Amino acid sequence: MKGFAKWLIQLGVALVSIWLISGVPLLISGFQEGEFLWKEYIDKLKQLVESLFPIQDFAVEHYVGGWTIKQIPLFPNLAEYIEYSLQLLFLALAAAVFFALLGTFFTMLLKERARQRVKMMFYFLESIPDILIILLAQLIVVIIYKQTGVLISSIAVIGDERIYWLPVLCLMILPMIQLYRLSMLTFEAEERQLYVELAKALGFAKVFILFAHIFRNAIISVFFQSKKTMWFMLSNLFILELMFNIPGIMYFMSQNMSGALFLITVLSFFLPVFLLYSLGEWAFMRRLKRGGAAL
Amino acid sequence: MKSVWKQPLFLLGFGVIVFFLLGSFVFEWIFGNEPRQTFFITENGRAVEGPPISPSWLHPLGTDQFGYDMLSKIMLGAKYTILAAMAVAALRMFIAVPLGFALGTYLQRHRSWINGLIDPIHYVPMTIFAVILLKPVLWMPPEGFSTGLIERVIIQVVIMALITVPIVAALIGNEANLLYHQEYILAARTLGASRRRIIVRHLFPQMREKMFVLYGQQIVETLIVFAHLGLLELFLGGTEVDYDPMFADPPKSIAYEWAGLFGNSFRYLQGAPWLPLGPAISFALIILAIAAMIEGYTRASNGQVELPKRKKLAFVSDETIEWNHQQLKEKMTLLQLKEEQKVKS
């Protein structure tokens, strides 16, 4: 129960901080003029909360053609954008985790010297900026189209169509490399444990030990360390939506910057991811306390 | 510790950065701060290509849509981008290091809940934070900027530095707290050393190397955020916007810094791919150079991983484990729980 209360406080503080930050641009504009707009800031925050309730009627302003303002309601329009963004994010996450673990599994079966080389290569691959990866992916699609006339995927979204596999591919590459490196490090540390030697001495095959023993223990460590990858992925998603013209919530926000929309955007990612990680931590912790595995 | 100047990786990275930085100043000194402009290329007295001109010997990276040479632009802009990223990272470290040490020593009782509060930051996209906070500073309002260029740069550097201070401080705090429970610190405390003395004499020298690595990583993160902001047309030092309703020029970056070069040109990918690729590859080069420097530096401070010639041993050798451990530490996203258990036992 104590853990739950702590979790609630964590959530509450995070929500309040996001709310407070959504008004800060006003303070910064004031600061540039050399005045402190505290009163306006507090008014703005109040107004934000009032506009949020009731949530069914919540709408944000959308500038059409620069001058006319259209009200876009949260349901169903914004919810659709959010849904698309979250779909991309979680598809890419699942793909990244899957391929990272698959890669780790196969590298672990290699000889040590080869492993070292693979790790070094991935260290440098990891530092390629996301913008370059997206640019190159789009360029390759364009070149293939020019050479063969086959459009393997559209590189920009027009209207309301939804493209999936190319954005997901671009979004998953860097997190996959990061997760791969992380899981290689933990798998190799786990490989040194005594129980592995025992299993080896008992004559189990390497593949079996790797899958049945090491994998189950190392995965917990990988989960706890993957937070930073998640963080990084969220920023990547933003850039991805911009560069592919994807009608997701982040793209929409970049076109119509406002405090209320900022709040909605941040919350639409914060809540699911926070929930996911809290659940995961809770489940793994419970397993640990039962004495399931050594962390 | 071996000399870092004997590490090929470190030297390589250092060379690339020095090339861009010094090159940028020298270039401006020789050619002035206006890039070369070519309106069209003629062959046998006939114009064969107008801007944007594709890469050739005359223009190794091509020219932009107004005929300005991309290579000159990239060289002229290098100093702003690199120095600004270094400044942001330095300021961030400058604020986060004292906070982190305080968190790891004076506030160690409260560390658990402070960490709990900092943790949710990991679920918020950082670029969005940077965008919403920097938009009022960098986007020119219709009546023109109320601040000067220097002022804007300073405000931008400060805001970007502050955004991730909590996370960096928490990392340093956890690491400092780990060291704080080592035996030799315990001995020092028993002998009556104050916390301040322990920080200055023991913790700081112990963590100096890690902080260099962290500094390098902060520069990389800052460069990436610059590129992201560039896509949103928020350029270093502000964006000049033409509010003419009919023939508005595209938003302009004030100097030729790379975020602006990239942000203005990525829509030309299909027609003139050299326009966005030039700045994007430059970003990648600098980031790779820093990664190489970090790796060279860690190798120099830990001794290189020399794999034993004998093959039949355990699965992996001790040296590999040592290297892995160092890499994990470098990430500094240490498992709190694991470390706390270690401390208790």
Image (cartoon, coloured by chain):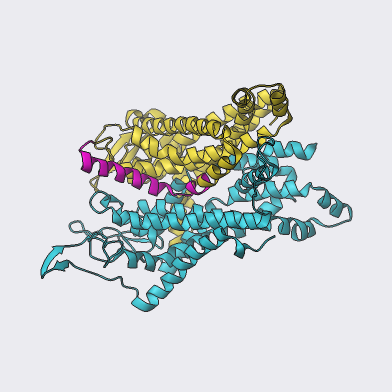
- Tell me residue B113's x, y (percent): 67, 40
Above or below, A244 relative to B14? above
| Magenta stretch contains residue A56 | no
Q: Quadrant of the N terminus of chain B?
A: bottom right
Q: Quadrant of residue A181?
A: top right
Pick the front one: B307 or A9: B307
Q: How many marks?
A: 0
Q: Is residue A264 left or right of residue A113?
A: left
Q: Is residue A125 magenta?
A: yes
What hue represents chain A? yellow
Q: Does residue A34 appear anywhere in the picture?
A: no
Most common secondary structure along the magenta stretch: helix
Q: Spot the residue most to the right.
A: B191
Residue B103 lies, in percent from the top left, at: 69, 49
Q: Which residues are magenta?
A: A122-150
In the image, residue A66 lies at what x, y percent?
A: 25, 48
Q: Position of residue B58 (x, y in %)?
A: 26, 68
Left of B148 or right of it: where is A195?
right
Residue B221 in view, yes or no:
yes
Residue B110 against residue B37 in the figure, above or below: above
Quarter placement of the C terminus of chain B? top right
Residue A248 or A17: which is nearer the viewer?
A248
Residue that protrudes farthest toward the bottom in the picture: B30
Q: Is residue A134 above or below residue B209?
A: above
Residue in the picture at 61% in, 41% down: B117
Residue B54: quadrant of the picture: bottom left
Q: Which residue does the image show at 21% across and 43% down from the upper left?
A: A146
Q: Which chain is cyan?
A: B
- Considering depth in this image, is B128 or A162 the residue closer to the camera? A162
Residue A5 appears left or right of B188: left
